[in-house]
Image (tube, helix red, strand yellow):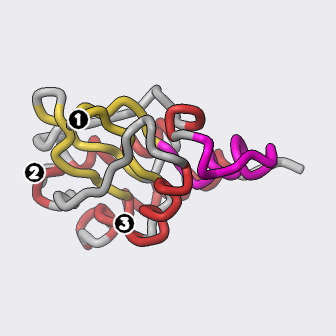
Amino acid sequence: MKTVSEIMTKDIKVCTPHDSVTSAAKIMRDIECGSVPVCEGKEVVGIITDRDIVIQCVAEGKDSNSVHCHDCMSTDVVTCTADTDVHECARMMAQHQIRRIPVVENGEIVGIIAIGDLARENIYINEAGDALSDISEHSRYDH
């Protein structure tokens, strides 16, 4: 069985709770993703998404240089460990309707696993595709 440690991204970028959301947005732009773990030291205390910034800062007309990550981040973060099986990881993504999961060991962040990492593994592409389908289906607006 393949584990998360074999395919996770180890060179990760994080924010601190007191960083501005502008800083978080710049990280998202630079690494081309829509979420960044928020850490105190190496401990994951939250996650901030591009959607969090838009809904809680931009749409409210707030100054993105004055709003901090702790003002917008989610603190209910789903994590896994490096030895989590990739099948279990795909199931977790689908269950929680998320695309990225921080990987922690002994309370410290050691990497991040994205649905794209799972999809790149040919043997798991159907499972990752199913997870993505479930995530996308449940996150659409019903207007």
Q: What residue span does the magenta drawing correspond to?
A: 48-67
Is residue 117 covered in magenta? no
Q: Is residue 64 left or right of residue 4?
A: right
Residue found at x 61% / y 41%:
67
Mark 3 is on which residue type? Gly
Residue furthest to the right: 143
Horizontal arrangement in the rendering, residue 26 relative to residue 143 (left or right):
left
The CA span between labels 3 and 1 is: 27 Å
Mark 1, residues whose alpha carbon is within 10 Å: few (<14), some, or many (≥20)?
few
**Disc on the earlier residue, 3 or 1:** 1
Residue assigned mark 3: 116
Q: Secondary structure at mark 1?
A: loop
Q: Position of residue 11 (x, y in %)?
A: 19, 61
When asked about the image quadrant of residue 109, the answer is: top left
Amino acid beneath label 1: Gly
The residue carrying mark 1 is 41
Q: Residue shown at 52%/36% (left/top)?
A: 73
Position above or below: 45 against 143: above
- Is residue 64 located in the magenta-colored stretch of the structure? yes
Q: Earlier in the sequence, mark 2 or mark 1?
A: 2
Q: At x 58% / y 55%, what residue is drawn?
A: 50
Q: Residues within 10 Å of mark 2 (few under 14, many from 20)?
A: few
Spatial CA distance of label 2 from label 3 is 19 Å
Q: Are circles 2 and 3 on residues that touch, CB within 8 Å?
A: no
As drawn, the label of residue 1 is 2
